[in-house]
Structure formats: C-alpha cells, structure tokens
Image (tube, grey):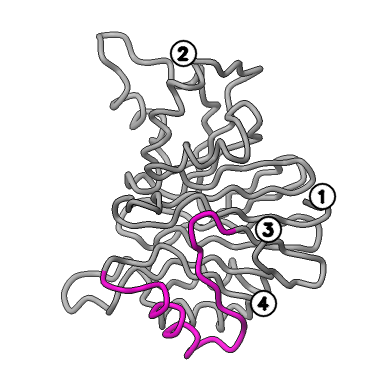
Amino acid sequence: MASNLLHLTVLGSATPYASVDNPCSGYLVSSGGTRVWVDAGSGTLAQLQRHARLDELDAIWISHLHADHSADLLTAYYAALFADIQLAAPIPLYGPPGIADRLAGFLTNTATRSPVESAFAVHELYDGHRAQIGALTLTSRAVEHGIPAFAVRIDAEDRSLVYSGDTAPCANLTQLAQGCDVLLCEAESAQVPADGDQVHHTPEDTGNTASGAGAGRLIVTHVGRFLTPQQAVARASARFAGPVDYAAPGASFSIGTAGAAGPGI
C-alpha cells in the first residue's frame, strides 16, 4: 500500500455479537507506517493479526466499553504480557474514563490487581481530546449512547476519516465530521425506538449525518440484526447523494489526496 494514503481495514462490523463470518466492531487505520486499532470487539484480535501484531501497533482507540467494541482487550492483555509478544513499552490505549479499572475488574483473579498498565499505557478520553500518534492526528468528541462514548476524527495530512462509534444522531458527531473525506457511521437501528432514548442511528440518520457534515463518502457499519447491509446502504443512500459503501468484514479502503476512497485489494 502506498504510504501517502490513509487506509481503513474492516476487521469486523457485527452487532451485538459476532456472526460466523463477521467479528464485532473493529478497524485498523494506518498511514505512513502508523497503525491504530480502532475498537476491539469480539473476534477482531484474530483478524488484526492478518495485518499487524500487537507489538507493531502505535496505539489502540476505544469508543466505549460495550463488549462488542472492547472485549478483545481482555485477550490482548494476555497476549501482550504472557505469550510470544515482546512489547518495548505498554501500548498506548485511548478510551473512556474508567477503562483501566474496568479491564482490571475482569482480569483480576486474586487479591492483587492485575497489572493492566503493564500492557497498556492508558489515556482517558474527554470531549475535544486530541492525540498525535505518528502520522495520524486523532480528535475525539463525546457522543450520545447512554454511557460515556466517543467518536473520532483521524487526520493524515489532508486526508480525513471520521468514525461515529455508537451514538444517536448528535451535533458533536456532525461537527466532528465536517468536510471529512470518509464518514464511517453506524446504522444499527431498523427504526427509531417508540419508547426510551435513541442511542443508535437508523440508516436514514446515517445518511442525514453524512449530508449534514458534507462528507465525501459514507461507509455504513455496525448494521443491526433486523437489517441487511443492502437495506442499510439503500436507505442511507436516499438521504445522502455521495457514494455509499458497506463495511464488509475484510474490506479495505484507501483515502487519497483527492478525497476519494475505494475498496482496496
């Protein structure tokens, strides 16, 4: 792959549990030799290893602590400390407040707290958090999912990718995605809930968010069990005039200097 492009590889996009051929939410974003694992849902660690080892990552970024976005951090911890991985230093881990204690709560089996920080150098996200990770600049905004949750904009020179994480439509996401080359946006809900708060996008919401942000391209992901990918793409396309793709497991997209993205090979 050319180093002057921003690359997105879909490790998985299923919700709320992995299917036979699709792990839960997880992506590898790379540019110029920098690699970031974005969300670590169930099954994505296995797929990550098709492209990079844990000790080749520059960082991990987690949108929120639901298991379909974070569960593989547990096995990544064991890989990092007790297997064939030799870390030069703990892997920078960016995630919601309390992420270290949440991991330790799962991993601790004795009176002694598991040394989560030996595997991960934890940085807690907040609204407006910014991190420079090699060739990539990551800007996080708080979004509306009923628990602490974040979206991220990843910039590499003049190329940009925005990932919604899980969220209802919200101003912070639309603002974060303004003028982005690619919006990777969830479309979990077949319809807006009749009762209770909305915590996900419908496909129509996904198209509206992309249109409102002036995104160059939309990639629909995290499609719920009561929708097919084809339905989600068609419904999003009715609200967004630009190109619309589906984040199929194993798909790769290259975001070039002209703002165009397309499946990689």
- Confirm or deny contact between disc 2 and disc 4 (CB under 8 A): no
Task: Please report the residue visible at 29 percent of the width from the left and 71 percent of the height from the top.
Answer: 198
Could you tell me which secondary element the residue under label 3 belongs to? Answer: loop
Is 28 above or below relative to 199? above
User: Amino acid type of disc 4?
Assistant: Gly
Q: CA distance from mark 3 to mark 4?
A: 21 Å
Judging by the rendered image, the residue that carries numbered circle 3 is 265
Is 65 above or below relative to 212? above
User: Amino acid type of disc 1?
Assistant: Ser
Q: Which residues, given as a range, are shown in magenta? A: 226-251
Count neighbours of disc 3 (C-alpha within 10 A) and say few if under 14, some if 14 to 19, many if 20 or more: few
Label annotation for residue 216: 4
Q: CA distance from mark 2 to mark 3?
A: 34 Å
Q: Is residue 243 shown in magenta?
A: yes
Residue 157 place in picture, x, y as percent = 81, 57
Pointer 4 or 1: first along the chain: 1
Could you tell me which secondary element the residue under label 4 belongs to? Answer: loop
Judging by the rendered image, the residue that carries numbered circle 2 is 82
Count neighbours of disc 2 (C-alpha within 10 A) and say few if under 14, some if 14 to 19, many if 20 or more: few
Pointer 2 or 1: first along the chain: 1
Pointer 1 or 3: first along the chain: 1
The C terminus is located in which quarter? bottom right
Q: CA distance from mark 2 to mark 1?
A: 33 Å
Q: Left or right? Give the position of 242 relative to 13.
A: right
Label annotation for residue 3: 1
